[in-house]
Amino acid sequence: MTTSSGNAVFLLLLSACCVTTLACDPKADGAKFGYVGSVGPAHWGTLSPNFSQCAKGMSQSPIDISTAAAVCNPELQPLHRDYTVANATLVDNVFNIALRFDGGGGNVSIHGKQYRLKQMHWHSPSEHTINGQRFPVELHMVHASDDGNVTVVAMLYRFGRPDPFLSQIQGKLVELYAEGCKAEKGAPVAAGVVSLWPLRLHSHMYYRYVGSFTTPPCTENVVWSVLAQVREMSVDQAAALMAPLEEDYRHNNRPTQPMNGRIVQVYPWFMGNKETP
């Protein structure tokens, strides 16, 4: 699908149905949360007792990464990611669009421990910032170990050339949008076999810190690796990722959270903070 034809398809879909028919509410433990008004991020901690860490947690995400304050740690290792191809399912979670890998999508190794890729999802605009700069889109690749620990690899995107990875599922995003127009909750769309190889490129330098989930219940002790290299996607691709969501969820970024004394480490140590977006 070309950029122009893809854009035309989404304009046609927007005129054919009302996205507010997606009536399913984003809920965790029965409490609705969102990004605007009384259910927005400033109120998450009061929406449910199970969301208390959103307000009281001392290691919350996302954060603003100051490259000048990042600490060079020679003990950090390269971000070994064993991604190849995998069967995937495209899901409208109401508060984000996710690609789910029920059979696993490969692994990432953190300090010798293996974490299996479970799903990836997108936020627009970005949740993490670099030296105060926010980007149009951020991708979160969520991994879990056999003992239940979680690590997330984050990638930031600016507008530019089409992203090769997203190009594989462009047509499936149209299908997901159409599913949302037909029912109160759009059915998942089988994305088939997707190649994860494009996501392994340009991942030499990264920032490491310990934080939390960026949606309720804001669970902490999540190990974050934010890639320093900012990638590109087209404006149409970004629009396609947000189109299936209700209007109030198309800007689904949580504001940056206090550092509370935390330190951001950078790999590779000998490059320091010279590689910036």
Image (cartoon, rainbow, N blue to C red):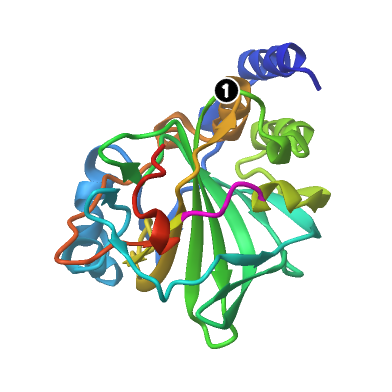
The reply, left or right, for residue 171 in relation to residue 185 is: right
The reply, left or right, for residue 79 in relation to residue 53 is: right
Q: Please identify the residue farthest to the bottom as the structure is shown.
A: 147
Where is 102 relative to 231, above or below? below
**Number of numbered discs on residues:** 1
Q: Position of residue 184 (x, y in %)?
A: 60, 41
Give SS at disc 1.
loop
Where is 217 relative to 254, above or below? below
The reply, left or right, for residue 238 in relation to residue 199 is: left
Quick one: quadrant of the N terminus? top right
Q: Nearer the viewer, residue 8 or 69?
A: 69
Secondary structure that dominates the magenta span: loop
Q: Position of residue 229 (x, y in %)?
A: 50, 43
Q: Which residue is mark 1?
A: 160
Q: Position of residue 9 (x, y in %)?
A: 73, 17
Magenta stretch holds residue 57: no
The answer to whether residue 142 shows anywhere in this view is yes
Q: Amino acid at mark 1?
A: Gly
Where is 18 relative to 30, above or below? above
In magenta, the rendered stretch is 201-205
Q: Please identify the residue farthest to the right as the structure is shown.
A: 193
What residue lies at 28% left-to-right and 52% top-to-bottom?
63
What residue lies at 28% left-to-right and 57% top-to-bottom?
70
The reply, left or right, for residue 181 in relation to residue 149 is: right
Where is 116 relative to 131, above or below? below
Q: Nearer the viewer, residue 56 or 130?
A: 130
What residue lies at 55% left-to-right and 63% top-to-bottom?
142
